[in-house]
Every structure is written in structure tokens, then in C-alpha cells.
Image (spheres, rainbow, N blue to C red):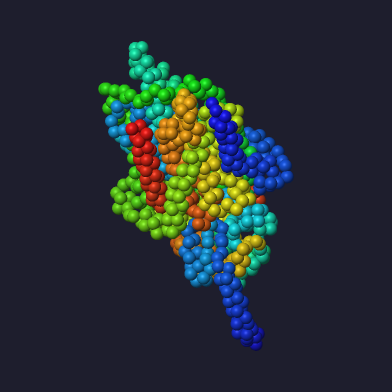
Amino acid sequence: MNRTMLNTKTALTPSLIVIVGFLTVCPVFMLVFGSFSEGLGAFGSFTLEKYIRSYTDPAFAGIIINTVIFTIGSAFVATVLALFLAYLNTRTNIPFKFLFRIISIIPMMIPHILFSVSWVLLLNPSNGMINLFLREILSLQGSPFNIYTLPGMILVEGLLDMPIAYLILAPAMAAFDVSFEESSKVCGASNLRTLTKVTLPVLRPAILASFILVIVRSLASFAVPSIIGMPGRIYVLATHIYQIIATGFAADYGMAAAVGMSALAASITLIYLYRYLTSESEKYVTISSRGYRPSLIDLKKAKYPLFGIVGILSFVLIVLPVVVLFYTSLVPYSMVPGAKAFSMMSWKNWVEVLRDPISLLSLKNSVFLGIVGASLGVILSIFVSYVIVKVRTRASGVLESLSFLSFSFPGIVVGVGFMWFFVQTPLYATIWSLLIGYIATYLPYGIRPLSSAFVQIHSHLEESSRVCGGGTLYTLRRIIIPLLIPGVVSGWILMATMFVRELTLSVVLSRPGTEVLAVQIFHFAEDGLWGKLSALGIMMIFISTTLVVIASLIGAKLTKVENG
Amino acid sequence: MKKFMILLLIVFMAPYAYSADQALAEKAKAEGKVSFYANITAIQPIMQEFTKNKGVKGEYTRISTSKFLATVLTEHQAGKLLADVLQAPLPIMEFLKNKGVLASYQSPSAAGYPDWTKKDDKIQIFGIEYVALIYNKELVKPEDVPKRYEDLIDPKWLGKIVMANPSSHATTISWLIGLKENVFTSEETWMKFVKGLAANKPMFVRSFGPTPAPVESGEKLIAISMPKYIITKAPAPLDWARVEQPLLGTPRGIAVTAAAKHPNAAKLFVDYWLSRDAMQMLADKVGEYVLRPGVYPPIDGMDKAKVLPIRSLSDDEIRSWGGEFKKIFDMP
């Protein structure tokens, strides 16, 4: 290894730590200050009272138990579903593969409030449509399902977070060195045995990454806990924090931050655990310099039954919520479908939204933030993941934890952290504060898929390039980036769709002129205007879909060029 | 003779008053715009009318009640308060007044308002965020509609009520306390009501916003909610129970900020906001209960209703009652 090589590498880590640190540490620092300050602002005289008060609350233990069940349950549902879909899609000859990409991404684009509300309309115990239907055909007295329970919350959160898991697992699965599986089969193992003994263990880093990311995400999630948990009187950390903020008129965000610190501690522990579990990263390298082309497994008789399962999943994940959404956008108020509802349908909500100048401005701003934000975010993520996976010093561990800092804080709190920070800068109340806030908070969406892609690239490839005289940038550009394209596309999609529907930061940071879609949707929700909300929600899904299609096409084209 | 003197005085002073108005309008125009922070539905028509009539751009920033204080105080402390005019529930306005955020201004438009709405020279109260029992008029028979608040504890409402969470939602907590202090004759009868309500196992949502939807769809039959939804959610089958007792609500106040970048435009805006035109729009389009005499929301029977303001509860009081209600309503 030559000297300039070493220098660029050593300079890369600290400069990234500075950039990522600046992005994520500032708001969190403000929150730390706030949690130790008397009064309501970020700066006040020192006190421990907020910590004492929040952690001696007798209800706190129960909330932690609910939170653990909720987050692990959601991570389990999301990862298992994603694994199933990614495996069928990348490794088997299942028909209609295009469906998979759609299923895996649609839930990313549906505002979580709406997705939760559609499930309440389907499964609430009083007049949920599925319950009414089952009561009718099975002549039951009570309702068979109640959405307002922990399993109900886990189901909906798991479905919502499934795309995160899928977009991490699918690239890893696609980049899989098939010779492992071939060796297994040569030794006489069945497909199933190969799957459990070879494929899944090799994918361990990606599976863990997805599991951990979903846990961290569901820890910060608010839509499901508030729409499904609160009516069922089930409280998790995010709703507990909301209670602290909402009780009384003078919301104490410092105390909320004090509670949020436990979420932060949990996330950082998980990240270190993840690093520890995947510390022998060499074990998982699957693309070396040999030719790589994942082979397809013939599903034979299982083909159509398996496809049936996928069909049901896509129905539940896409058709149902989108139909409910579309239906809601056409009726004048929340009503159970029937002759009356159909007679009252009109485009009124659509017309009103399209005539509303603020809704139109918010469409424009969100598209800008989606495209520009995701592009900048992915570029930063490539560098950060490279350092995290390939440099693997103590400093790169620091970098990895930093990237998770604002992500792992419950959203309502981190938004205020950013406000406390940005108000000290000239960026306050500009669209750039939203852009920076988004990238800082959702950096893991770029880093996760990219690191699981990096993990699979053997250092032999880089070394060969260097032996042939290629510098770091050259190696990065010619060898690594092409192999990373599936990860880049996944990261871009995760970020862009997230930014288009981002609510928690936006609701604190957006101002006249910088309105964004989700805030407009949130205001419709606060006023209970579900029709307008659904109309704007569908426009949002349309925008995200367009972005995803463009990204996927570009990705497909680039991969083809590099392979050919 | 006395009348004549007054008349003479009015005729004599009118040009001065007019020119004072004129001067304010001119200065406001020179400032160009006014920034207004509030959390109130669908007031774009008022902002547009103001912009059109006064030639000053009205810019509305909507900030949720739970973030209102945090946002305004953060900006104020950093010397970057962007708002010229603030509007919020009275307890928040009083908190801001104590922090020195508000300026003194007594609007000439407030002349016809009741005396209790201008207790100090900074905050002008203009409306009451009124709460009522809102029911589904297609699913609840007329004879079943509550005639008194106490009727809500009848076991026939078991599992059929939706309300904002009484352990945390400040307005609902204040409303329950308002009932104790203004409506019920004794603490015992009130407590019986609260416990009876709890025994009917209401479904809790986080604020008033999500209360009407379950009633519209028939998931629940009755809500402790706001009559303004009858207007904003029309043609939903919602109606309000015309109880014999008064309706209660939190007063809403408006004020100019001390650090306003557009102080004259701010005054002009408050004048306009309190005028009959703007208040009529607020009542008609949003269904708000306003305190300008003679202006009522177009909700059947609301012009005859007695609507009382709830006193401002301190946050400590709200938290401690929230804790009590948590126990009574048996929440984990």
C-alpha cells in the first residue's frame, strides 16, 4: 500500500467525523442542554430534576416493557417478510417479479398516519370492515379482531417498516456469491438446507442491519403508537414522551429529551452490538474477483402457492390501503362503504386541494427536498459507509454511532433540537434548514444499504486495482461504485421517499414559503379533514412512485453498462 | 344638551380619528407585510381579504398548540421572533405576556367586545374554543340525545363515547374542571359524573382533531368535541346536544409582539381581525364562537346557547388533575 493511499484514508475518517458530527451532534447537544436546564429553553440553570422526575415515574417500567415488545415484534415482522420477499425475488424463478419491487416500496410512500387509519377502518372492533364481514359470514356475536392491541400495533408497524428491511436485504441477496450455495448443493444438501445453513448465515450482517434499523425506527415512530396504541391505552416511549409534551400548555421539551435519552442509549448499544456481531466482516464477503451471477432456484410445484402468499401480501400492503385512501378522498366524510357513500362521491376534495396555493407550494418544495436531499445524502453516505466498513478503526466506530444520533431520537423531540440549533444560525426558517435536518436525521437510510453492499465487496478487488496503480478515488469510481449501484439505488429511494413524506422535523422547521407535503397533510389531519388529506396523500404517493421508477431505471441502466 | 355635546364632539373629532386610522394604514403599507402565528383552521380567506383590502401582505404560520410556546420562546430568546401578531389559547398568551413577549395595544375595533375580554392592555380575547357533546344524528335517536351532561353516564353509552385523553389533553382537562366550577352544584355530583363517564369506557384519542371521525363513521356514537366540526365537516351527520347547562371553552386571545418587525402592520391586522367582517368570516367558515356581539356561527341553536369561558388553569394544576383523571379513568 503506498503512502498517498494511506494519507487519503487517514484524512477521510476525521473529516467525515467532523461533517457527520456537525450534522447530528448539534441538535442532540441542544437537547442534552435542554434536559439539564431549568425552564423551557435549551439554556437555563443546571438541574437534574427532569431526569429524576421522568425516571421515577411509576408508569415508566410498564412503558419500557411495551416498547421492547413493540419494537422487537415490529423488527421481527418486517425482517421476516422482507427476507421472504427478497429471497423469492432475487433467487427464485417466481413469476411477476416486478410486483416485488412495488410491494416493497409502496408502504414507504404512504403517510404513516393514513396507513394506520386505513387499518383502523378495517379492523376496529366496533365497525371495522373485516370484522363486520367476518361477523356476518360466521354469525359471530363479537368482533374477532381488535386493532387497538400490541399485536395490532406490531402488525401495522412491521408492515410499514418492511421496505427498510427489504431495501437492505435485497441488495445483499443480489450480490450473493452463488458458489457458496453451489458447493452446498454439490455436497448433497437440499435447497431448504442450503437456505438455512448457508444463505441465511452468510446474510447475517444484512439481517442484523435490517433488524436493528427497524428497531431504532419503530422506537422513534409516532403514527402507529398514537393512532392505534392510544385508543387501546397501550403506551410506548414515543407516546409517553408525547404525553409529557402535551400535558399542559407550556410543553417541556427538556423533560421529553431526558426521556428520549434512554432511546438514544438503547440505539447506541444496539449499534455497538451490531458491530461486535459482525466484527469478523471478512467472513461475510461474498463478491470477490471471481465472476458473480446469482443463479435462480427452480421453485417447481411451490411456485404458485408461494406466489399466492405474495399476492395476499401485496393486496394487504398496497391494494387495501391505497383503495381505502382513494375511497376516503372521494367521500365527503368518514363513512362505511355502502349505497349512501357511493351516491355522495365526488372530486370535491381533489379540486379544493389543487386550488389551494399552499398545497401546491408544498408539492414543489417536497419534490425539491426529495431529489436534492436524497442525492446529497447518498453521496455523503457512500463516503461514510466506506469508512465504516472498510477502514474499521475505532474512529470509524465513532462515525457509525454518530450517524445514528438524531435518527434514534423520538421525532417530536429531535425536531425541537434542530429548531434550538438552527435558530442560532442564519439558516433558520429557510428551506436549507429542512434539507440539512433531513439528511442529518435520516443518514442511516443511506448508510445501511450502502454498508451492507460494501461488506460484500472483497478487499482483493481494491487491492488489485491499487496494484495496477489506481488511486483511492480511481478505485472508488471504477471498481467500488459500480458494484454499489444496487445499494446506491436503495439508499436513494429510502431517502427520497422519506424526505417526501417527512413530518416530524418539518412540522417544527417549516415556515411560510417552506411548506412541505407532510405538514400540509398533518394540518388536514388535525382538522379531521380526511378527504383532502387522502387526496394530497395520493398525490404524494404518485410523486414518490415517479422518483422510485426513475431511480430504478437509472440503476438498472448503469448496472447493465458496467456488466456489459 | 348632553347628547348634543357628544354629537358635536363626535363630529368635531371624526376627522382626527380618521386621520389616525389613515396614518396607521399608510405606515402599515410601507412595512409591506405582517406575520401571524396561530393554530386555527382555514383562516386563509381572512388573510386574503386583509391582503386585498389593506394592501399589506398577511402571512400565516400555523403552529400546533403543543409546539406553540416552544417555537415562540425559542425565537424570542434568540432575538429572531418572526411573528408580528400571535394568537393562541389564553393560558399560552398569559405565559408569553409574563415572559415579556407581548406589546401593549388596545385596538379601537375592540370597542364593542364585553369588558371581561380586555382585562389587560396586551391580550384581547376574541373567542371561546367551545366544547360540546357531538353525536351522530343518523344513529342516535332524538330521545336518546343527552339533555344534561349527566345523561352521558347512562350505561347505554358504554363503549360508544370518544374523547381526547383526559390525562394529558389540556383543553379536555380544563373542560372537566370547568364543569366542576361552573355547572355542577357540588363536588360530589361532579365526581359522580366523572366516575360514571370513566365507567362507560370512552375511547381516547390524542386531541380534539381525531374525535369527529369515529362519530361520522359510526365507530362511536358521541364525542366530547367541538361544535365547529359541524361546519368544517359538513355534510357529515354531526349535531350537538343542546344541554340545559351552559357550554364551556378556553378563551382565545390575540396580541401584538413586543419585537414586531412590522409594528404598524401588526396593529392594523389586529384591528382587522377584531372587526365584524373578519369575525363573521371566522364564525361562518370555521364555525368558531366569537365574542363580537351579534356574531354567531351558523350552527342551529348556537345563538341561544350560553357559552362560558373556563378560567386559566396553571400547568401544575393541569398536570395534577391529569394525574387524578389517569387514576379515575383507569389508565396504565
Asked if residue A459 can be seen in this view, the reply is: yes
Instruction: Quadrant for residue B293, please give it.
Output: bottom right
B16 over A429 or under it: above or below = below
Position of B53 relative to A403 (above/below): below
Q: Position of residue B53 (x, y in %)?
A: 50, 71
Can the viewer see residue A119? no
Q: How many marks?
A: 0
Q: Residue at x 40, y 27 (%)?
A: A175
Q: Nearer the viewer, residue A195 or A255?
A: A195
Q: Which residue is most to the right? A: A45
> Residue at 66% across / 48% down in the picture?
A41
Placement of A272 over or under B206, stated as above or below = above
Tell me: residue B231, above or below residue A548: below
Q: Quadrant of the N terminus of chain B?
A: bottom right
Q: Nearer the viewer, residue B234 or A266?
A: A266
Q: Nearer the viewer, residue B112 or A450?
A: A450
- Hey, which residue is sitting farthest top in the picture? A187
In the foreground, A385 or A558: A558
Instruction: Judge left or right: residue A45 versus residue B130.
Output: right
Task: Estimate the x, y position of residue B259 in percent, counting from the top left.
Answer: 65, 61
Q: Is residue B210 left or right of residue B70?
A: left
Identify the residue shown where x is 37% and y is 34%.
A562
Which residue does the image show at 44% across and 40% down from the upper left? A492
Q: Quadrant of the C terminus of chain B?
A: top right
Q: Position of residue A54 (x, y in %)?
A: 64, 37
List x then y, in percent, for residue B303.
50, 64
Furthest toward the front, the residue is: A469
